[in-house]
């Protein structure tokens, strides 16, 4: 895997694009913070027709991805908080970090929930640059009889 391959994967995944064609947007609303619609997805990718929920209960596995993302984001928050504000056992700085981290996790949750689904789907569905709709209606040519 080259750097370009990884960068292209990250770019399309962070923008919540279909892992199959990397063009279609799989959620019905663009804004994840409309909370009643955060997880509203198309059944199929609007561009390539890739099925989203591969089987009943498929999204259950998203919980593991979501957990991993939450841990990774918390570690990231710990590092920058440590660098900029310092963390010590001698004061309340750990409590402050916990509060800051909690607020960031809550604010990013709707996006992370969507991101988890796209990452989880991308484990099973791989990029195909030639991905096209599976059911394309082809115009029928009138048959001439002469
Ligand atoms: Zn697609």
Image: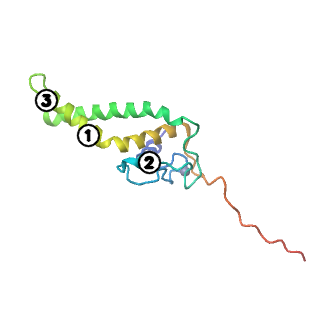
Q: Is residue 82 visible?
A: no
Question: In the visual, does 25 lie left or right of 92?
Answer: right
What is the number of the mark on residue 93? Answer: 3
| Numbered label attached to residue 104 | 1
Distance between the alpha carbons at the discs numbered 3 and 1: 16 Å
> Is residue 3 shown left or right of residue 96?
right
Sequence-wise, the earlier of marks 1 and 2 is: 2
**SS under mark 3:** helix
Image height of 87 relative to 106, above or below: above
Name the residue located 48 percent from the left edge and 53 percent from the top edge: 25
Disc 3 to disc 2, how far (Cα)? 35 Å
Q: Nearer the viewer, residue 130 or 116?
A: 116
Mark closest to the chain's N terminus, 3 or 2: 2
Task: Name which residue lies at 43% across and 32% down.
Answer: 63
Looking at the rendering, which quadrant does residue 135 occupy? Answer: bottom right
Residue 23 percent coordinates (x, y): 50, 54
Q: Residues within 10 Å of mark 2 (few under 14, many from 20)?
A: many
Q: Where, by quadrant of the figure, is residue 116 drawn?
A: top left
The residue tagged 2 is 16
Q: Residue 76: x percent and y percent?
A: 28, 34
């Amino acid at each position: 895997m080259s750097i370009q391959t990884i960068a292209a994967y990250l770019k399309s995944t962070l923008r919540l694009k279909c892992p199959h064609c990397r063009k279609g947007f799989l959620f019905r609303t663009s804004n994840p913070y409309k909370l009643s619609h955060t997880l509203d997805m198309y059944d199929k990718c609007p561009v390539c027709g890739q099925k989203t929920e591969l089987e009943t209960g498929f999204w259950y596995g998203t919980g593991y991805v979501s957990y991993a993302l939450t841990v990774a984001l918390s570690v990231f928050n710990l590092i920058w908080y440590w660098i900029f504000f310092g963390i010590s056992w001698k004061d309340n700085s750990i409590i402050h970090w916990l509060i800051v981290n909690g607020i960031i996790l809550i604010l990013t949750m709707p996006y992370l929930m969507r991101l988890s689904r796209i990452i989880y789907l991308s484990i099973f569905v791989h990029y195909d640059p030639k991905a096209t709709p599976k059911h394309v209606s082809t115009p029928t040519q009138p048959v001439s009889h002469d």
